[in-house]
Amino acid sequence: MQKEKSIGIFDSGIGGVTVLKEIIKVLPNENYIYYSDSINNPYGDKSDNEIKSICNNIVKFLLSNDCKIIVIACNTASAKTADYLREKYKDIKFVAIEPAYKMVYDYAYDKPTLVMATKGTIESEKFNLLLKKYNNHKTFLLPCIGLADLIEQNKPNEIKEYLQEHISQYKGIIENVVLGCTHYPLIKNYIKDILGDVNFFDGAPKLAEHLRNILEADGLLNDSGSGNIKFIDSQNLKAKEDRFKAFIINN
């Protein structure tokens, strides 16, 4: 019997599990290889060339493990490397996450909006083209330097202090929050504690639908597979794997 191919997913750490969770909802029978790049986390303080080199090595690893399509589940990696990887690997499809700013345009255009993302994402050409096209002129951009790293390290008290310092000024002003880093959905409750009952937008659900459409169009859907998930951490950290599995099972 022919071996079932996998969907490869990678992130600078554990944040991309929020993307995988949405993908599993629409593709429960697929096999997955999730690559958490703890050794190079965070990506946001690295040069474009460094990020390209890192992501290229991850893609080579995923392809060597028989992945049929690759999901870039990191907004910084997506903004910096998606075009490069698509050009380099023409025979493989890439599906790349991006900040869900267009969703604000589609569903809540007239509402004041806070975009929380890494500095690299906010400064990227890809995001700025998105902002220019869909700008509601009620948008605040917040480069959350170091926040993804705190989430990656699982430091709840420091996360709460960080949010209090950086987003409390938007309380009563903001109605929409764009979660422009895949780590940030992991702390939605903390953000709500400060900003109140805001509307969250992230790109994972739309990415999951898009991924399914691509697999279906290419005849690559696996509707009767075993749904295995293989977790790989570049530092082989057991604690990361435990958090990953707990999120998949319990959230």
Image: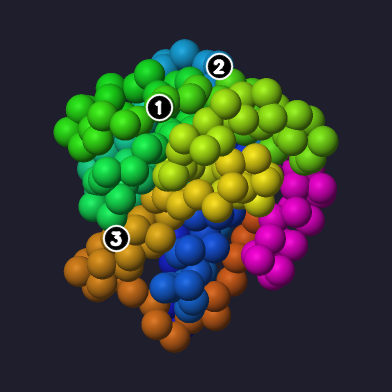
* Residue at screen point 61% across, 24% down: 166
- Check disc 1 and report the residue beneath it: 140
Q: Is residue 145 left or right of residue 244?
A: left
Looking at the picture, tell me which residue is in the foreground, 179 or 38. 179
* Residue at screen point 59% across, 71% down: 228
Looking at the picture, tell me which residue is in the foreground, 219 or 182. 182
Can residue 98 be seen by looking at this rendering? no
Q: Please tell me whether mark 2 sits on a helix, a strand or a loop.
A: loop
Start-end of magenta stretch: 232-251
Dot 1 or dot 2, earlier in sequence? 2
Q: Depth-wise, is mark 1 or mark 2 nearer the camera?
A: 1
Q: Please tell me whether mark 3 sits on a helix, a strand or a loop.
A: helix
Using the rendered view, name the quadrant where residue 167 is placed: top right
Q: Is residue 246 magenta?
A: yes
Q: Is residue 81 magenta?
A: no
Q: Are marks 1 and 3 in contact (CB under 8 Å)?
A: no
List x then y, in percent, for residue 27.
43, 73
List x then y, in percent, for residue 190.
68, 45
Which secondary structure class fits the magenta region best? helix
Q: Which image quadrant: the C terminus? A: bottom right
- Check disc 2 and report the residue beneath it: 45
The mark found on residue 210 in the picture is: 3
Dot 1 or dot 3, earlier in sequence? 1
Name the kind of residue labelled 1 in the image. Answer: Phe
Label 2, residues with CA under 10 Å away: few <14, some 14-19, many ≥20: some
Mark 1 and mark 3: Cα distance apart in space: 28 Å
List x then y, in percent, for residue 21.
54, 63
Name the kind of residue labelled 2 in the image. Answer: Asp
Q: Are marks 1 and 2 in contact (CB under 8 Å)?
A: no
